[in-house]
């Protein structure tokens, strides 16, 4: 009886590993596709307000911003990133402009580099 259970568990484990490996390759391909879909952009923060969530020493903030992609009309975006006190101070006192990447297929998907404020304001693109 124990040999049968062990064989069953061994076969089940092997199938899980095999299926897991197949699924992870597909996930890697999806990540590569997402990475090639991103184009460089800049954002200008137009509003920032503290959110309700705490994540350790950091808080969530509701941020509104304009997304600037060279050669395309600007569009508005928003998000609720988790930021630390230094990042918030930079947004309020140092610069409202940040480098980012935006998805070609979904302009609402924006990755913002909150750690590096830009010194110059991006020029608005014509509509």
Image (tube, rainbow, N blue to C red):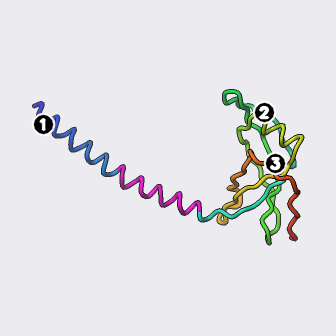
Pointer 3 with pointer 2, Cβ within 8 A: no
In the image, 37: left or right of 53? left
Please say if 38 is above or below 7: below
* Other residues around mark 2 within 10 Å, as few (<14) / some (14–19) / many (≥20): few
For the residues labelled 3 and 2, the Cα–Cα distance comes to 18 Å
Q: Quadrant of the N terminus?
A: top left
Q: Quadrant of residue 105?
A: bottom right
* Other residues around mark 1 within 10 Å, as few (<14) / some (14–19) / many (≥20): few
Q: Which residue is nearer to you in this view: 101 or 119?
A: 119
User: Which residue is found at the position 71% from the left and 62% from the top?
Assistant: 40
In the image, 14: left or right of 59? left
For the magenta stretch, what is the residue range?
20-35
Specify the label residue 64 is tagged with: 3
- Give the secondary structure at mark 1: helix
For the residues labelled 1 and 2, the Cα–Cα distance comes to 59 Å
Q: Nearer the viewer, mark 3 or mark 2?
A: 2
Q: Earlier in the sequence, mark 1 or mark 2?
A: 1
Mark 1, residue position: 4
Please say if 76 is above or below 1: below
Q: What is the magenta segment's predominant secondary structure?
A: helix
For the residues labelled 1 and 3, the Cα–Cα distance comes to 61 Å
Q: Earlier in the sequence, mark 1 or mark 3?
A: 1
Query: Across the whole image, how many numbered discs are drawn on residues?
Result: 3
User: Which residue is found at the position 69% from the left and 53% from the top?
Assistant: 111
Q: Quadrant of residue 67?
A: bottom right
- The image shows residue 13 at horizontal and vertical percentages of 27, 42
Mark 2, residue position: 85
């Amino acid at each position: 009886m124990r040999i049968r259970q062990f064989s069953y568990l061994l076969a089940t484990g092997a199938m899980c590993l095999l299926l897991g490996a197949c699924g992870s390759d597909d996930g890697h391909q999806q990540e590569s596709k997402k990475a090639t879909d991103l184009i460089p952009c800049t954002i200008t923060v137009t509003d920032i307000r503290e959110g309700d969530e705490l994540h350790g020493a950091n808080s969530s903030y509701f941020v509104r911003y304009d997304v600037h992609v060279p050669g395309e009309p600007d569009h508005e975006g928003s998000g609720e990133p988790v930021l630390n006190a230094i990042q918030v101070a930079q947004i309020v006192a140092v610069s409202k402009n940040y480098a980012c990447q935006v998805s070609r297929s979904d302009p609402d998907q924006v990755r913002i580099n909150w750690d590096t404020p830009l010194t110059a304001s991006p020029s608005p693109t014509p509509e």
